[in-house]
Image (tube, rainbow, N blue to C red):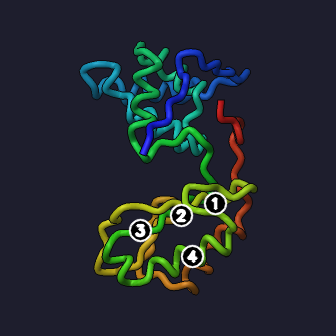
Amino acid sequence: MSWKTKLSRSMVVTRPTTPFCTPAMIAQWEQKLLPRYATRHGALMPILHDVQHAYRHIPYAAMLEIAAFLRIPPSEVLDTVSFYEEYTTQPQGACVIGICHTFACEICGHQAILNHVRKRLGIEPHETTPDGAFTLLTMECLGSCDTAPVALFNDVLHEGLTIEKLDRLIDEVLALAPRKSPHAGSST
């Protein structure tokens, strides 16, 4: 196994004309988040959660804006984003399907569930459909071993999954129009 490095020091980040950290977000962070922490840096993870939920990823330009707001080096924001698996720098689908692949779910047939999603959506784990509707993830234990196999659909746990239940959930998502953000598709 080898570590792949990225030349972050010389990386050029294109800034959009519209900031990712909107005035409304900043006002909320100043009023509700910052008072809860001894230092501004303490609010980093909740702010990253807000940005991740707003844009389905954390663009590099947003990391620069967050660093400026918190008055910390951008490298500390990038270190945090790259350390935690829940954060992503690439846009995720409007619906993130997270299929548990630990022991209980493995015994109860998670592989058939995973294979069905892969075939139906035409993506592999940690990929997003070209239309941005779905991202497929494999996840560690979701804490519902007694109801395996299980999966998350946008943070909602679905237990005792079958192919039929899975197809109904996917069909429900497909029936809804995909959400678009002002920065949709931007990874800079």
Q: Which residue is drawn at 30% across and 67% down?
A: 143
Image coords of residue 5 (percent x, y): 50, 30
Of 25 and 149, the residue lying toward us: 149
* Amino acid marked by disc 1: Phe
User: Which badge, 4 or 2, comes first in the chain's sequence?
Assistant: 2
Say which amino acid is labelled 3.
Cys
Q: How far apart are marks 3 and 2 (CA)?
A: 10 Å
Residue hosting label 1? 134
* Tag 4 secondary structure: helix
SS assignment at label 3: strand
Horizontal placement of 30 versus 7: left or right?
left
How far separated are the C-alphas under marks 1 and 2? 7 Å
- Amino acid residing under circle 2: Ile
Distance from label 4 to label 2 (Cα)?
13 Å
Task: Point out the frontmost of discs 1 and 4.
Answer: 4
Q: Say which of marks 4 and 2 sits in front.
A: 4
Q: Name the residue under label 2.
A: 97
For discs 4 and 3, the disc positioned in front in the rendered view: 4
Which residue has dot 3 on it?
A: 100
Check disc 1 and report its element: helix, strand or loop: strand
Image quadrant of residue 42? top left
The quarter of the image holding the C terminus is: top right
Mark 4 vs 3, N-terminal side: 3
Name the side, left or right, on which 186 lies relative to 89.
right
